[in-house]
Image (cartoon, rainbow, N blue to C red):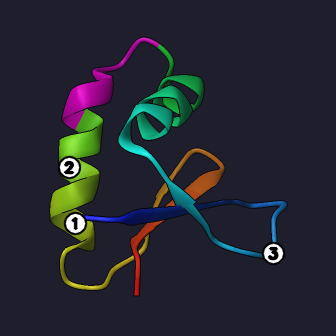
């Protein structure tokens, strides 16, 4: 699954590697479970939804 990210201050979506996704999640949620959050994001975006965590949006690459 390819995931794109976009911070609230950005205008374009960026294809992001899984290791970078984990870094973004840690930045946004702090001490919360980053792997669990990533799993939730993957499940939620399967149907074409966009998920916002902190100031970053996630979506499946179209």
Disc 3 on helix, strand or loop?
loop
Q: Is mark 1 on a helix, strand or loop?
A: helix
Earlier in the chain: of badge 2 and badge 3, it is 3
Identify residue for label 2: 40
Say if 26 sits above or below 47 in the image.
above
> Which of the numbered marks, if any, corresponds to residue 44?
1
Image coordinates for residue 25, horizontal then vertical, percent:
47, 34
Where's residue 27, x and y in %? 59, 25
Left or right for 58, reference 12: left
The range drawn in magenta is: 31-36
Can you tell which of label 3 and label 1 is closer to the viewer?
Answer: 3
Q: Nearer the viewer, residue 21 or 57?
A: 21
Which of the two marks, 2 or 3, is nearer to us in this view? 3
Residue wearing tag 3: 11
Quarter in which the N terminus is drawn: bottom left
Q: How far apart are marks 2 and 3 (CA)?
A: 24 Å
Q: Residue at x 19, y 32 (%)?
A: 36
Q: Does the magenta stretch include residue 15?
A: no
């Amino acid at each position: 699954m390819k995931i794109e990210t976009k911070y609230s201050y950005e205008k374009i979506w960026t294809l992001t590697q899984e290791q970078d996704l984990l870094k973004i999640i840690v930045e946004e949620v702090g001490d919360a479970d980053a792997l669990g959050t990533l799993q939730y994001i993957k499940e939620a975006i399967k149907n074409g939804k966009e998920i916002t965590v902190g100031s970053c949006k996630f979506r499946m690459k179209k």
